[in-house]
């Protein structure tokens, strides 16, 4: 990773590094995992629910162009991060190890807190009073519908592929260890 530029805060650095940190944690999680058929199925149900929530959010989001007020944004301010947390919980369940849950929870708490703070600062700089009004009053847009095109434009298919890869790796490890 290149040297941070002048003026970057620790929060911005962590927010920008969260994907790389996620891959690093993923390697550790995979190494520690002791998945079984039962833990993979249970984790799959939870993780797919999290990805479905993320996909729903991505189908409403117009990044950096507006304050999104439709879909799951009517319910929570950061549905993509909530979905990611649910996915992380599902993968921790699939791993069959409490230590993995601790690693995943720590990673998510640190990186998503940093991402949320960084994102909210950006939204306030970009949209000012419009963003603050949304956060204060919960103004919603019930007219906008989910758009598959928008979800794909937001590259949510990458998250789907990542989830599938993680679950296939867990199934492979369970099979390799004779637990599947």
Image (cartoon, helix red, strand yellow):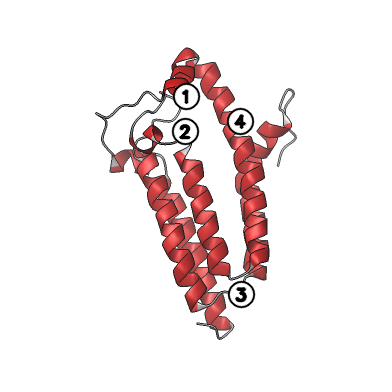
Which of pointers 3 and 1 indicates the residue nearer the eye? 1
Q: Quadrant of the N terminus?
A: top right
Q: Which residue is at a point 51% across and 72% down the rendered structure image?
A: 39
| Residue 56, picture quadrant | top left
Q: Earlier in the sequence, mark 3 or mark 1?
A: 3
The foreground one among 11 and 20 is: 11
Disc 2 to disc 4, C-alpha distance = 12 Å
Disc 3 to disc 1, C-alpha distance = 42 Å
Looking at this view, name the residue that lies furthest to the bottom.
178
Q: Earlier in the sequence, mark 1 or mark 2?
A: 2
x, y (%) of residue 6?
Answer: 74, 24
Disc 1 to disc 4, C-alpha distance = 14 Å
Residue for badge 3: 34
| Residue 79, picture quadrant | top left
Q: Which residue is at a point 49% across and 63% down the rendered structure image?
A: 165
Which of pointers 2 and 4 indicates the residue nearer the eye? 2
Q: Earlier in the sequence, mark 2 or mark 3?
A: 3
Q: Which residue is at a point 53% across and 71% down the rendered structure image?
A: 170
Q: Is residue 53 left or right of residue 103?
A: left
Disc 2 to disc 3, C-alpha distance = 35 Å
Circles 1 and 2, Cβ within 8 Å, touching? The answer is yes
Residue for badge 2: 77
User: Which numbered disc covers residue 135?
Assistant: 1
């Amino acid at each position: 990773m290149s040297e941070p530029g002048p003026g970057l805060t620790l929060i911005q650095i962590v927010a920008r590094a969260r994907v790389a940190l996620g891959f690093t944690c993923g390697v550790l999680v995979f190494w520690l995992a002791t998945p079984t058929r039962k833990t993979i199925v249970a984790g799959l149900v939870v993780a797919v629910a999290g990805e479905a929530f993320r996909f729903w959010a991505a189908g409403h989001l117009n990044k950096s162009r507006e304050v999104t007020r439709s879909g799951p944004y009517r319910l929570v301010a950061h549905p993509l991060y909530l979905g990611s947390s649910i996915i992380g919980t599902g993968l921790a369940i699939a791993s069959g190890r409490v230590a993995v849950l601790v690693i995943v929870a720590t990673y998510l708490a640190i990186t998503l807190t940093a991402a949320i703070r960084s994102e909210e600062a950006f939204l306030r700089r970009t949209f000012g009073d419009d963003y603050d009004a949304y956060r204060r009053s919960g103004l919603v847009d019930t007219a906008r519908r989910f758009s598959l095109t928008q979800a794909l434009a937001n590259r949510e298919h990458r998250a789907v592929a990542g989830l599938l890869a993680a679950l296939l790796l867990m199934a492979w490890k369970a099979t390799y260890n004779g637990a599947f």
